[in-house]
Amino acid sequence: MPALITTDLVALDADLGADKGTVVRRLADMVAADGRATDADALHADVLAREAQAATGLPGGIAIPHCRSEAVTEASLAFARLSPKVDFGAPDGPADLAFLIAAPAHGDADHLTLLTALARALVRPEFVASLRSATSEEEVVRLVDEVVSPAPVAAAAAPAGAPATGATAAGASAAGADGAAAGRKSIVVVSACPTGIAHTYMAADKLAAAGKAAGVDVHVETQGSSGATPLEPGLIRSADAVIFAVDVGVRDQGRFAGKPVVQSGTKRAINEPDVMIREALAAADDPNARRVTGGAEAETTASSAGRPGTATEIRRWLLTGVSYMIPFVAAGGLLIALGFLFGGYQIVNDNPDVEGQSYALSWVLNNSFLDLPSAPGVEGLNDGFLGYLGAVCTVLGQAAFSFLVPALAGYIAFAIADRPGIVPGFVVGAVSVTVGAGFIGGLVGGIIAGFAALWISRWKLPVGVRGLQPVVIIPLLATLIASGIMAVLLGRPLAAALEGLGNWLNGLTGTSAILLGIILGLMMCFDLGGPVNKAAYVFATTGLTAAATGAPLVIMATVMAAGMVPPLAMALSTAVRPKLYTPAERDNGKAAWLLGLSFISEGAIPFAAADPLRVIPSMMLGGATTGAIVAASGVELRAPHGGIFVFFAMQGVLMFVLALVAGAVVGAVAVTVAKSIGRTDADDAPEDAVDLEHAHAPAHAPARAATA
């Protein structure tokens, strides 16, 4: 197996730049120059995207920028001893030791195991000290090889149970040696980070070491990129408390149900492992401590007290509901749009010949492919095969749309109470629709249903009836409580509020409509698929469920048009001023044309992650421009997704396109100007230009030249 590091991937006492972006760029250049990556720019962009999720600076002057990248062909380590130090976001100051950990997007298990071995070595003071005192590149390579070679890894793993394999960590081995299991506290730990290479294992080892120092048995399951071996059920049962040191969801969280839990991101576990161990011990003795409630996998971030803050939890509940609801929106909305295309725009209207049924429903119920309907001479209706096909699409789409509010409420409740919340959540959502409370009732009802199910699930029932709790008692009582509250107390005022909102929207004209368009445009471009973007999108799509015309259709057009602006604006900017962007960003710009036309706002995320202060305000300006024009001109849209490709569902296609072009141009000009401010001619040169002086020098030559 090829070595992870060579002397060409080492730079000692090097000045690689004044900020972490420049340092990462120089390290990426070293990896590419050594033939281990196909594109230094793509690797640089992927590392910075990982940095945007969480800083990789660690206490003690260490930085471990890392990523998985399609550009990496061979797992690699590039090391620099920095002079001067550079800030990577560590709490105690800048770093003088920087390791770039570059893994292939689909790395093999052997290489990933070695990479994680290095990450674990970086928590050992003696290894860090040896790196600082190394006098040559060869010595650094030897030191790294010693900690990542298979034999030491196996040896280190065996006595402690190897947190990497999910077994017992260092604290447990001490317990086994003296046989002091009785009387000792036991804690189980799960650690996981988005990349699954560095923070996952460093957090695990820090907690294991802190547990050993505190005389606590610590058993660790690392859910990393090299795989995970689940903790033994017996260890979980006997544990006094659980620590979740995670930046992503915990797999199979239900295994820990009922255990006292302390939860945080991996960074806190690395920085404050002693504090988290003390918090877990305190939780074990506290009957009112927060406990694991189930296995809903959700991204969580802890507050300073070691548990998710209220705002974080509410955001998680709502985004869970929205994320599960969106497929119903997409399927139902596009089917209805196809129904308008094939059957005509009156296909959803009441059929005067059949009481209580629309043209679509009556044609589906009373006809077949062998007996196609004849349109009753009504303008806006098609007959024959197209009319029947439009009717079928409309009925299917309306059926899918009928699940919007129940799905929203059901999965909000699921996020709060796990599976026991699904039934009461879905029912209260359906009741909300029945009483006219709409999506507002779904939001409120889902939260009520979730907490009702969670409360009942914690009842200590007799053993004989405990088996009925999840399948009978919780669904029955939680549904009665939540839906009863919605039907008796909340339904009427929420319905009145929703009706008032609808009347206000339908009355918007002139300046008011423009203001609403600006607000929605700003929301759609603020976080590019995040909670603010999703809030505006849900506001628009839920209006489609009942609207055949009017303000809700204008809002849908406004939201979709504004959401298309960021990718298109960035694509235009990269085409007009390519020298402002790296080759990888130029490639992203080419792909962004199609993403923007398809209403995929996330196409602008790579640009926003690399330069948020210039990109996001510029995109918001473009989105607000488009939103104002669409809202003021009264463009209507009946499809919830699809971008320009659902033109057949638009009323006012020309104004929609003109507004989209205007916003994209404004956003592109704004971001181009913002990126141009303060740049010199040298800065404006292509980043992939060949440096003739160093074209054939070793990978670390630029660093030494800079130092000299």
Image: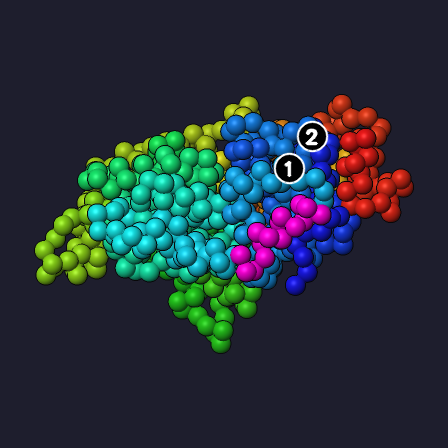
Main SS, magenta region, reads helix
Q: Quadrant of residue 666?
A: top right
> In this view of the protein, which residue sits in the foreground, 630 or 604?
604
Q: Residue at x 52, y 65 (%)?
A: 389
> In this view of the protein, which residue sits in the foreground, 437 or 708?
708
Q: Position of residue 119 (x, y in %)?
A: 54, 47
Q: What type is the residue that disc 1 sits on? A: Ser
Q: Secondary structure at mark 2?
A: strand
Q: Position of residue 432 (x, y in %)?
A: 30, 45
Q: Is residue 636 left or right of residue 244?
A: right
Q: Position of residue 533 (x, y in %)?
A: 51, 38
Q: Quadrant of residue 606?
A: top right
Which quadrant is the N terminus positioned in? bottom right
Residue 385 vertical position relative to residue 80 in the rendered view, above or below: below
Neighbor class of circle 1 (other Cα within 10 Å; few <14, some 14-19, many 20+) is: few
Q: Position of residue 534 (x, y in %)?
A: 48, 40
Q: Residue at x 36, y 44 (%)?
A: 212
Q: Would residue 213 be visible to someone looking at this image?
A: yes
Q: What's the magenta region?
A: 138-152
Does residue 557 show up magenta in the picture? no
Does residue 140 show up magenta in the picture? yes
Residue 207 vertical position relative to residue 155 in the rendered view, above or below: above
Would you name the residue on which mark 1 appears? Answer: 133
Would you name the residue on which mark 2 appears? Answer: 83
Q: Residue at x 89, y 39 (%)?
A: 693
